[in-house]
Image (tube, rainbow, N blue to C red):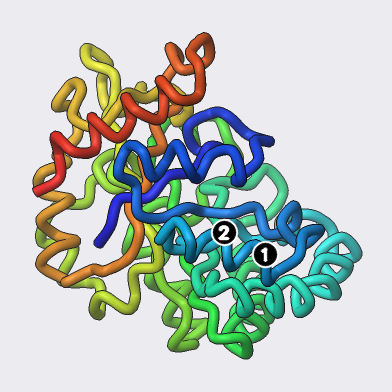
């Protein structure tokens, strides 16, 4: 596995990768996640040259369509997906990820499951046609479901149910240590993951100290290893034991970054990553 960065995951969305890549190289990052819609406006040859010149691996992109909205919105997004996949193929972006909302106020579990199965099967098939692996992320914090009418997928077992039903070899996981721990997963649960090809991407971070696990907020976190609340050493070992060879990103939702310069945040995130890299 290799150390990658995303300006968006660090809280600095909308930046130009032409500006960011030299800084990423400076601090020892090896990969980058891209905004495929934004990059589709650029020359793919020049974009690939930029990555190759800086020896920067293309760590993939977020799913560029809305699958949680109405059928019309979803189908409009599906129409644009093949052309974006063509670009992704040209610039070696062979990983795509998204997350599953762990609740619904309108759909019961079974109805929501069938809707996700139907729509994500279609997405998975298109991505697979272009050699792109697709990773799904469960959202683990119990507080994210508090007060909602219906629970939905929020841990590894329920996500495995969906992945098993879709049953496509390019479909796998985006694993985040925050969601992993707060959903109650343990080291033994890595045995439920078929192998390294099933893991598309990984996120690392930590949780604030002094807050009960069932009161942790999804969007309030810490840098990797900062508090020791999350069992990040076990998580990293689990990835290594599976021989995961893809990108690992810091996704901290770290409040101090909001008032920091991007380069300082980039440097701090890399330093935190280095300390937990086993």
The residue indicated by pointer 1 is: 46
Q: Is residue 254 left or right of residue 103?
A: left
> Is the N terminus in the top left, top right, bottom left or bottom right quadrant?
bottom left
Packing grade of label 2 (10 A; few <14, some 14-19, many >=20) is: some
Q: Secondary structure at mark 1?
A: helix
Find residue 74 and report its image quarter: bottom right
Residue 55 on image: x %, y %: 40, 61
Foreground residue among 184 and 251 = 251
Q: Residue at x 68, y 54 (%)?
A: 107
Packing grade of label 1 (10 A; few <14, some 14-19, many >=20) is: few
Find residue 231 and report its image quarter: top left
Residue 85 on image: x %, y %: 68, 76
The residue indicated by pointer 2 is: 50
Foreground residue among 22 and 84 = 22
Contact? badges 1 and 2 (CB < 8 Å): yes
Q: Residue at x 14, y 34 (%)?
A: 275
Q: Residue at x 42, y 81 (%)?
A: 164
Q: Is residue 160 above or below residue 256?
A: below
Q: Residue at x 61, y 79 (%)?
A: 89
Residue 203 on image: x %, y %: 35, 47
Foreground residue among 1 and 109 = 1
Residue 257 on image: x %, y %: 46, 17
Q: Is residue 71 left or right of residue 59?
A: right
Please indicate, yes or no, whether residue 18 appears anywhere in the rendered image: yes
Cα–Cα span, label 1 and label 2: 6 Å
Q: Is residue 113 above or below residue 68?
A: below
Q: Is residue 205 left or right of residue 265?
A: left
Q: Secondary structure at mark 2?
A: helix
Q: Residue furthest front?
A: 53
Foreground residue among 66 and 256 = 256
Please indicate, yes or no, whether residue 175 appears anywhere in the rendered image: no
């Amino acid at each position: 596995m290799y150390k990658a960065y995303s300006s968006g995951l660090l809280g600095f969305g909308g930046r130009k990768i032409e500006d960011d890549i030299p800084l990423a190289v400076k601090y020892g990052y090896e990969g980058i996640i891209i905004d495929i819609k934004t990059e589709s406006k650029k020359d793919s040859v020049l974009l690939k040259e930029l990555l190759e010149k800086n020896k920067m691996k293309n760590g993939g992109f977020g799913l560029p369509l809305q699958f949680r909205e109405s059928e019309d919105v979803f189908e409009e997004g599906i129409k644009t997906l093949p052309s974006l996949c063509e670009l992704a193929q040209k610039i070696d972006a062979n990983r795509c990820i998204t997350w599953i909302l762990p609740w619904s106020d309108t759909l019961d579990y079974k109805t929501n499951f069938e809707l996700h199965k139907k729509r994500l099967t279609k997405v998975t098939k298109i991505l697979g046609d272009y050699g792109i692996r697709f990773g799904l992320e469960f959202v683990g914090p119990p507080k994210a479901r508090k007060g909602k009418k219906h629970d939905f997928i929020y841990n590894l077992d329920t996500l495995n149910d969906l992945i098993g039903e879709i049953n496509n070899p390019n479909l796998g996981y985006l694993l985040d240590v925050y969601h992993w721990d707060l959903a109650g997963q343990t080291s033994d649960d890595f045995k439920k993951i078929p192998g390294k090809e099933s893991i598309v991407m990984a996120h690392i971070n930590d949780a604030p100290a002094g807050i009960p696990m069932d009161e942790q907020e999804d969007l309030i976190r810490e840098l990797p290893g900062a508090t020791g609340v999350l069992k990040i050493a076990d998580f990293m070992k689990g990835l290594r034991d599976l021989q995961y060879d893809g990108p690992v990103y810091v996704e901290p939702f770290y409040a101090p970054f909001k008032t920091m310069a991007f380069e300082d945040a980039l440097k701090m995130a890399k330093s935190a990553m280095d300390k937990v890299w086993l």
